Image (tube, rainbow, N blue to C red):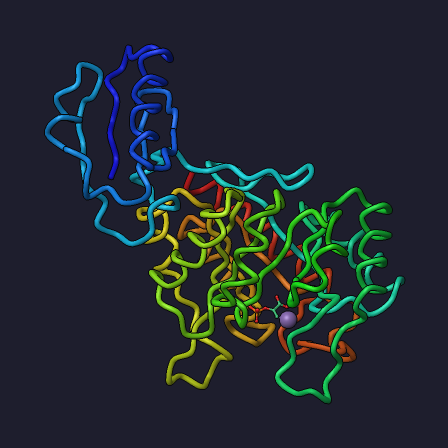
Amino acid sequence: MIAVLKSGTTPAQRDHLVAWLRRMNLDVHISEGAEVTVLGLIGDTSRVDMELLGSLEIVQSVKRVSEPYKQVNRKFHPMDSVIDIGSAKIGGGHFAMIAGPCSVESEDQIIGVAMAVREAGAKILRGGAYKPRTSPYAFQGLGSQGLELLRAARKATGLPICTELMDLRHLDEFHDIDMIQIGARNMQNFDLLKEVGKTDKPILLKRGLSSTIQEWLMSAEYIMSEGNEKIILCERGIRTYETATRNTLDLSCVPILHELSHLPVVVDPSHATGKAKLVAPMAVAAAAAGADGIMIEVHNDPAHALCDGAQSLTPDKFADLASRVEIVREAIR
Ligand code: PEP
Ligand code: MN
């Protein structure tokens, strides 16, 4: 349920109302906008007398929120959320390119790629240390050593770092990681979602392999219900019957999510297409669709990459893509 307060409501009047609602065992989420203040009520709202609440002097309107996701719902928080990731910002008009290899492989590789993508305009460095691989015999990532190399690359370039957390037992090791990625395979690992929800780290929540938009938003709700509001959604393609691409990029989710939620939306055309030649056209399309950021896999030597070489761009190709994305962003501004 949401209650929209009249403009001109004083902080004291608002706090008085909030205290009354909290005495009814409700959690009250306050969203203070330039124009209006929205109180989002969470919990058993069946006992709230809507007529009474609506008749209060300072209340403009009261509505039930029928969607099962509440705190990530735009009705609860009409303004776009802006997430700070180190020196970068995503959402509410702030756009960032996130780039780097699928996996961290060596110091030379990660620092070399980090320098090159920063030069081309990337604002965040990505790289997997713990890798979710379909085969147990495939390269599983460098683990702790990979995290160390990411820290070295951050030191060398100043770029904030983003890497995937797969196992709760590793959470302590991620204490200084700038943004934690929850991968597609873990989108519905609810225990993991609850734990990252207790941290204050920005979370890049990838869409599950065959998850609906509502399921995805419910996963974001899991994180936010524990107190962490710093969530960025990342579309990375979904399973369909099409086999010409690794997955099918669902670009329509960008405007849909912007309508349903206040959270920023990033698009990853690398995992969505699985083919390097399709990455740039789909990145440009994502920018045109209004994405708040784009995540691209970049490798210094894609042919010899230990993971996802076929979809990785060279630094030169990434630089070209980044400038085309900029042109599109200018054009739609
Ligand atoms: C990745 O970003 O390297 C990755 C494994 O992505 P996803 O979870 O989308 O497959
Ligand atoms: Mn990958």
Above-or-below relation of 215 to 81? below
Image location of residue 113, percent across then percent down: 78, 59
Query: Is residue 246 toward the left or the right of residue 126 in the image?
Result: left
x 39%, y 61%: residue = 251
The answer to whether residue 8 is visible is yes
Marks counted in the figure total 0
x 62%, y 74%: residue = 311
x 75%, y 47%: residue = 176
Which image quadrant is residue 111 in?
Answer: bottom right
Question: Where ligand 2 lies, by image quadrant?
Answer: bottom right
Image location of residue 40, percent across then percent down: 32, 35
Which image quadrant is residue 64 in?
Answer: top left
x 82%, y 52%: residue = 151
Query: Is residue 194 toward the left or the right of residue 54 in the image?
Result: right
Query: Is residue 212 toward the left or the right of residue 308 in the image?
Result: left
Above-or-below relation of 311 to 262? below
Please state, as top left, top right, bottom left or bottom right, where the N terminus lies in the image.
top left
Query: Is residue 148 toward the left or the right of residue 248 in the image?
Result: right
Q: Nearer the viewer, residue 114 or 257?
A: 257
Q: Which of 162 and 171 is in front in this view?
A: 171
